Image (cartoon, rainbow, N blue to C red):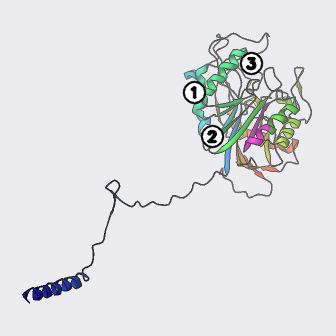
């Protein structure tokens, strides 16, 4: 009986404990353990990061001829003071915000070598190799080597120039070895080619070849930039004739036909140089043409009197497909043995307005007194103001 009584009591106690345990709330688990590695896993809070906006427009700056000084001949001295460090000082800040900064490099970058030309009245240029640092510092990242001075020191000069530009990450084209190039900047794929009527360069006068090159580039590029060195020289040849131009008995090409044909083939921006003076600008099928950008920084060996000293910077804003949005003419002047400087008289703007009005009255752009270039019928507001 005692045993039965004890068992009964024990059963009641266990029953009461079981009931009371339902009232106890379990502890909340703050962290979990990975039983495979016995480590505490803390939940990460990831903040949503807004997706980067794709670049929809680009800024392209273009200038004319560049020859920062020559060490040939040795006497007299044709190198600038302070080793040329200040030649492009004033222009450098004006390129700010540009994705592409283009110029025409007149003469090879070379320390040694022997002259290649056999003439008494012609000029030969040989720019010290380390002067490439001045171009880099100014921001130049695209150069044409298609001109009459690129071969002044023969194959050696061309090859050494190419090596130096490659080393300094400056894109270039315009030689028989490299008639065109492609490259990417900030997510935009560019194609670039350059032409001239000179030995060792893709021939400006062979328009069918130019068309073929541009078509190839257009298939693989967002924006195609074309450079040409052509047209007759000097202040008596300021106008675009729309015909083949001759100078010193040489056919310098029909630059009007060339520019239009390459745009028909897929070019988006055409920069011309060669006449050593500025010429008109034109908008053709929504694409920009500058027929000559003149002398920009040509130390000591160039005639810079009157029209020859006018040295504009053309700054363009285009869509990522190359279609022109707006532009700006920044007026510069170059005095003898000095670099380009801002011109308060705005002569470059006045000349380009005059020449464009005369040569291309049908073109669909308006240039105001401040140098703003707008499509006719668009807002007067400008991203350059």
- Can residue 273 be seen by looking at this rendering? no
Residue 284: x percent and y percent? 84, 46
Queried whether the magenta region covers residue 61, the answer comes back as no
Contact (Cβ within 8 Å) of mark 3 with mark 1: no
- Give the Cα separation between the discs numbered 2 and 1: 16 Å
Mark 1 — residue?
133
Establish if 75 lies above or below 187. Answer: above
- Can residue 29 be seen by looking at this rendering? yes
Nearer the N terminus, badge 3 or badge 1? 1
Query: Depth check: 109 or 278 in front?
Result: 109
Q: Residue at x 74, y 27 (%)?
A: 305
Residue 22: x percent and y percent? 26, 82
Q: Secondary structure at mark 1?
A: helix
Tell me where residue 50 sits by quadrant: bottom right
Mark 3 — residue?
151
Nearer the N terminus, badge 2 or badge 1? 2
Q: Secondary structure at mark 3?
A: loop
Query: Depth check: 80 or 111 in front?
Result: 111
Mark 2 — residue?
95
Query: Depth check: 332 or 379 in front?
Result: 379
Queried whether the magenta region covers residue 224, the answer comes back as yes
Q: Which residues are magenta?
A: 216-233
Q: Secondary structure at mark 2?
A: helix
Which callout, 3 or 2, points to the residue nearer the camera? Answer: 3
């Amino acid at each position: 009986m005692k045993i039965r009584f004890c068992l009964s009591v024990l059963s009641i106690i266990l029953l009461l404990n079981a009931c009371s345990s339902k009232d106890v709330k379990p502890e909340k688990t703050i962290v979990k353990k990975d039983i495979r590695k016995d480590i505490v896993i803390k939940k990460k809070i990831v903040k949503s990061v807004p997706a980067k906006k794709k670049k929809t427009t680009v800024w392209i700056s273009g200038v004319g001829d560049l020859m920062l000084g020559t060490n040939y001949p040795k006497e007299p001295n044709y190198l600038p003071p302070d080793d040329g460090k200040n030649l492009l000082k004033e222009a450098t800040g004006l390129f700010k915000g540009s994705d592409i900064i283009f110029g025409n490099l007149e003469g090879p970058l070379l320390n040694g070598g022997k002259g290649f030309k056999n003439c008494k009245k012609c000029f030969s240029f040989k720019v010290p190799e380390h002067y490439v640092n001045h171009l880099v510092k100014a921001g130049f990242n695209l150069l044409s080597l298609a001109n009459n001075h690129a071969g002044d020191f023969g194959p050696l000069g061309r090859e050494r120039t190419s090596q130096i530009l490659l080393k300094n990450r400056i894109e270039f084209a315009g030689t028989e070895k490299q008639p065109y190039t492609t490259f990417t900047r900030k997510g935009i794929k560019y194609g670039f080619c350059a032409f001239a009527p000179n030995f060792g360069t893709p021939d400006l006068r062979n328009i069918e070849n130019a068309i073929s090159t541009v078509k190839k580039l257009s298939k693989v590029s967002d924006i195609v930039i074309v450079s040409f060195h052509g047209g007759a020289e000097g202040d008596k040849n300021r106008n675009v004739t729309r015909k083949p131009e001759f100078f010193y008995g040489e056919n310098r090409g029909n630059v009007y036909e060339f520019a239009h044909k390459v745009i028909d083939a897929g070019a988006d921006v055409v920069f011309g140089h060669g006449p050593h003076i500025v010429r008109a600008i034109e908008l053709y099928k929504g694409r920009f043409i500058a027929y000559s950008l003149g002398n920009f920084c040509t130390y000591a060996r160039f005639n810079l009197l009157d029209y020859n000293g006018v040295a504009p910077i053309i700054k363009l804003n285009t869509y990522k497909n190359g279609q022109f949005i707006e532009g700006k003419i920044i007026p510069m002047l170059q005095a003898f043995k000095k670099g380009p400087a801002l011109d308060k008289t705005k002569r470059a703007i006045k000349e380009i307005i005059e020449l464009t009005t005369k040569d291309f009255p049908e073109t669909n752009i308006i240039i105001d007194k401040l140098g703003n270039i707008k499509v006719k019928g668009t807002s007067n507001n400008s991203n350059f103001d």
